[in-house]
Image (spheres, grey):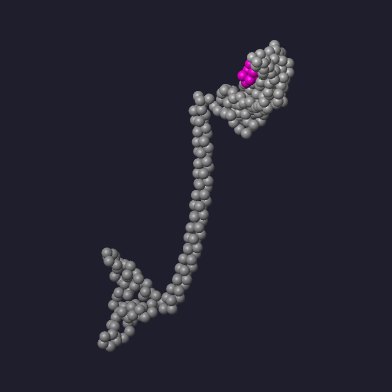
Amino acid sequence: MPLLIGALIALVFIAFNTFFIVDEREKAMVLQFGQVRSIKEDPGLGFKIPFVQNVVFYDGRIQGIDTPSLEVTPLDDRRLIVDAFARWRIADVGQFRRAVGAGGMQVASQRLESILNANTREVLGSVRSEAVLSADRVGLMNRIRDQAIAEARALGVDVIDVRLKRADLPEQNLEATFQRMQAERQREAADERARGNEAAQRVRAQADRTAVEIVSEAERDANVIRGEADAERNAILAEAFGADQEFFAFIRSMQAYRNALRGGNTTLMVEPDSAFFDYLKSPHAAGAPVPPPAPEAGGESSAAPSAASRTAAD
């Protein structure tokens, strides 16, 4: 009985070292004394010679690699700090084993990181920094990916994609860049204000010109209307005074007396027999108008009041 149990245990141990299971997420390689004997990539049960051959498993899924911050210098000598990442997977297990040896996935990641850094420096160093910071970045990433794919075939891996996560200026250059950007924005603002002031001056000049034209036209029309009114007034006065010249002379004299004899200006230096005093002389003086007959009681008794009454009546 003990021999049977020992035999069963030995058979189980031998079976455990003879058969192996390949998961759908893995790829298996059978080695004999370090040499590749077979490769099994399909999931299922595999076979190997116990105690002579051993199995190495590799992850067949898509792997990721993030490169450390990398400083590149584009054509315009503006240094950039770039972070990139790549997605890759094993394409040829035999080539992969021959390329990386026993180091496996860790050595492959280091080799891919070196390839990615070299291609990133080469591609970004061939363009200006504006291209890296613009929509042209997609084309640059595709160039890096294509070059990485060509070089990674020697490792037995397939590079699926390469992307730039970040492309920034170094810390020591940020302040100078911000100051330059601020100066450019201030210059643009000054240009906008200058253009605005120029447009405002044109609008004000046009408005002033329009105002002067309107005022000039209004004054011209007012002068025309005033002249026509004065002409019409003079015509009416001339017609009215022409109907009675003696009354016209009397009115003119009264106006002259009023202007000459107003308060504070009553001193006149004229000859006593001046024609200016014709209507102030005695009614019986030579050349004076003959007054009408004296009315009855309560009536007027002088020519001047009679003329005033006539004026009032007119």
Query: Is 185 inside the magenta-drawn segment?
Result: no
Residue 147 falls left or right of residue 271: right
Query: Which part of the image, by quadrant, shows the N terminus?
Result: top right
Residue 85 falls left or right of residue 149: left
Name the residue located 47 percent from the left edge and 72 percent from the top edge: 235
* Along the viewing direction, whichever of 314 and 52 lies nearer the viewer: 52
- Of all residues, the one furthest to the left in this rendering is 297
User: Total marks drawn?
Assistant: 0
State whether the magenta stretch is mostly helix, strand or loop. helix
Name the residue located 52 percent from the left edge and 49 percent from the top edge: 203
In the rendered image, residue 46, in percent from the top left (x then y), is placed at 71, 21
Q: Which residues are magenta?
A: 102-110
Residue 120 falls left or right of residue 95: left
In the rendered image, residue 168, in percent from the top left (x then y), is placed at 55, 28
Name the residue located 50 percent from the left edge and 44 percent from the top edge: 197
* Along the viewing direction, whichever of 23 and 258 lies nearer the viewer: 23
- Of all residues, the one furthest to the front in this rendering is 1
Query: Which part of the image, by quadrant, shows the C terminus?
Result: bottom left
* Along the viewing direction, whichever of 111 and 253 lies nearer the viewer: 111
Snapshot quadrant of residue 138 = top right
- Of all residues, the one furthest to the right in this rendering is 38
**Above or below — where is 183 with respect to 200?**
above
Q: Is residue 123 visible?
A: no
**Above or below — where is 208 with respect to 280?**
above
**Above or below — where is 204 with respect to 295?**
above
In the rendered image, residue 267, in percent from the top left (x then y), is placed at 27, 65
Snapshot quadrant of residue 253 = bottom left
- Of all residues, the one furthest to the bottom in this rendering is 296
Name the residue located 68 percent from the left edge and 13 percent from the top edge: 51
* Along the viewing direction, whichever of 198 and 129 lies nearer the viewer: 129
In the rendered image, residue 204, in percent from the top left (x then y), is placed at 50, 49
Q: Is residue 105 visible?
A: yes
